[in-house]
Image (cartoon, grey):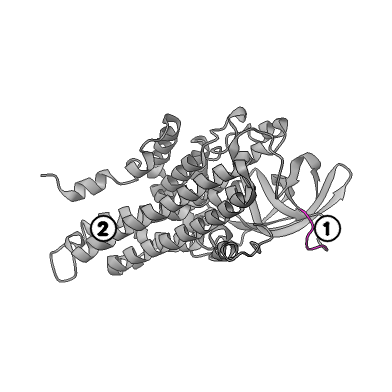
């Protein structure tokens, strides 16, 4: 009879995609997922450098780029995959199950490739001609974009520029009239040489993302290299580029905490197959309380994912109809994001508690998972404040969020 520990090893995401990730996926998505899993040995070998360098090692970043993981939402017409939102989430989950920092940069880099759907064809082709093109973005601060002849003069300092050390472009928010609270916001794109990176990413979680501050002073941005933050006019026909950009932005990272939690479940199962309770020969896996913890974690993960999928399904339909239906769909997507992050934190916390003292060592995958999932959950797109938006709508009030 085959030992259950062997079964766990066979289902290890380091070996192949789990069935919940790959079942029913089109061939092109399966190929991407297989490419993600093929990176597992490199990621494992380089992981200690993530914390030491506070960024991804060059070899890991290059491998992600070579696998096409920073082109997931680039339009088909420009040589990208233009994955559906659901396919995109599956890929991000798979990458995040290997490592939270890797998943975060796949989510951010792959997500930002959607700008090819808002830019002129010639510009987008030029920027993404290099397979290693990566757009670091920040919506955590607003700079100034003073109108000048032919474009804007942009200045500011922006935080959380994930992947800044490897970025070829930087997307920033800039206000045309900063003295006016309701001034329109622009997405402005800066070149690598236009910015100064401040090496200030000293954090407890997602250390390998290199999410440093970056700064620009009096940089000319051509009008063709900017578009409205809210309501940009799509240059590509796909539904992805017609959906509310702020909602698509929020969706792009929702798979990260779920992937981290999924990886934690696998790591705990492996630990439970070899770790005995102090003073006994009984393995953790043989205790009913542990079995219940893993079963509950699995149920929580699947439920959170189902809520996200349901919310995105409705958002896609509501994009075509608009009106109040779209407003509600956007709010529901935000609370699905917040719920997924909270659920992922609960899963990792419960598994770490069941693992006992083993989970406090940096060599334990669950120790990293706890740190990484809590860092990911701090993102505004997964903030508990999103519940306020949905609550206000349910109570007959306006959303009450300027960037909603």
Identity of the residue furthest to the left in this view? 1
Distance between the alpha carbons at the discs numbered 2 and 1 = 56 Å
Q: Tell whether 233 sits left or right of 319.
A: right
| Residue tagged 2 | 271
Where does the image place residue 292, in percent across and percent down from the top left? 24, 62
Identity of the residue furthest to the bottom in this view? 279
Earlier residue among tags 2 and 1: 1
Q: Is residue 276 magenta?
A: no
Q: Tell whether 94 sits left or right of 193.
A: left
Residue at (69% x, 60% y) in the render: 402
Identity of the residue furthest to the right in this view? 149
The quadrant of the image that shows the C terminus is bottom right
State the image quarter where residue 321 is shown. Answer: top right
Q: Tell whether 12 sits left or right of 279.
A: right
State the image quarter where residue 360 is shown. Answer: bottom left
Q: What's the mark number on residue 261?
A: none
Residue at (57% x, 32% y) in the render: 80
Q: Is residue 37 above or below residue 330?
A: above
Q: Residues within 10 Å of mark 1 (few under 14, many from 20)?
A: some
| Residue tagged 1 | 177
The quadrant of the image that shows the N terminus is top left
Query: Can residue 52 be seen in the rendering of this structure?
Result: no
Q: Tell whether 212 sits left or right of 24.
A: right
Identify the magenta region. 180-184
Which one is nearer the viewer's eye here, 327 or 185?
Answer: 327
Q: Is residue 338 above or below residue 44?
A: below
Where does the image place residue 42, in percent across and percent down from the top left? 41, 44
Where does the image place residue 208, in percent across and percent down from the top left? 50, 55
Q: Residues within 10 Å of mark 2 (few under 14, many from 20)?
A: many
Where does the image place residue 272, in percent across and percent down from the top left? 23, 59
Q: Is residue 81 above or below residue 222?
A: above
Query: Can residue 224 be seen in the rendering of this structure?
Result: yes
């Amino acid at each position: 009879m085959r030992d259950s520990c062997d079964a766990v090893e066979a289902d290890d995401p380091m070996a192949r995609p789990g069935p919940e990730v790959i079942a029913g996926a089109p061939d092109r998505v399966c190929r991407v997922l297989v490419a993600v899993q093929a990176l597992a040995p490199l990621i494992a070998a380089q992981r200690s450098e993530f914390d030491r360098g506070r960024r991804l090692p060059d070899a890991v970043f290059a491998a992600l780029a070579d696998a096409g993981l920073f082109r997931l939402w680039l339009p088909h017409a420009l040589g990208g995959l233009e994955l559906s939102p659901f396919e995109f989430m599956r890929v991000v989950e798979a990458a995040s199950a290997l490592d939270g920092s890797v998943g975060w940069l796949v989510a951010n880099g792959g997500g930002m490739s959607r700008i090819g759907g808002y830019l002129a064809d010639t510009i987008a082709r030029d920027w993404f001609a290099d397979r290693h093109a990566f757009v670091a973005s920040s919506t955590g601060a607003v700079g100034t974009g003073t109108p000048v002849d032919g474009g804007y003069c942009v200045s500011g300092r922006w935080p959380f520029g994930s992947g800044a050390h490897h970025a070829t472009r930087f997307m920033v928010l800039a206000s045309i009239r900063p003295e006016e609270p309701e001034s329109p916001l622009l997405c402005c794109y800066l070149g690598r040489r236009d910015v100064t990176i401040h090496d200030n990413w000293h954090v407890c979680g997602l250390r390998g993302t290199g999410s440093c501050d970056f700064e620009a002073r009096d940089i000319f941005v051509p009008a063709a290299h900017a578009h409205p933050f809210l309501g940009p006019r799509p240059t590509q026909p796909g539904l992805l580029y017609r959906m509310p950009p702020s909602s698509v932005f929020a969706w792009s990272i929702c798979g990260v905490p779920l992937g981290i939690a999924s990886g934690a479940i696998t790591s705990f199962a492996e630990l439970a197959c070899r770790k005995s309770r102090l003073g006994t020969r009984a393995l953790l896996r043989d205790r009913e309380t542990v079995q219940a913890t893993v079963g509950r974690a699995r149920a929580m993960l699947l439920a959170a994912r189902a809520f996200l999928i349901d919310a995105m399904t409705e958002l896609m339909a509501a994009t075509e109809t608009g009106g109040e239906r779209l407003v509600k769909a956007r709010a529901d997507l935000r609370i699905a994001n917040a719920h997924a992050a909270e659920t992922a934190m609960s899963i990792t916390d419960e598994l770490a508690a069941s693992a006992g003292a083993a989970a406090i060592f940096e060599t334990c995958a669950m120790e990293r998972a706890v740190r990484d999932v809590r860092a990911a959950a701090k993102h505004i797109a997964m903030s508990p404040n999103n519940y306020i938006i949905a609550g206000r709508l349910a109570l007959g009030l306006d959303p009450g969020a300027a960037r909603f």
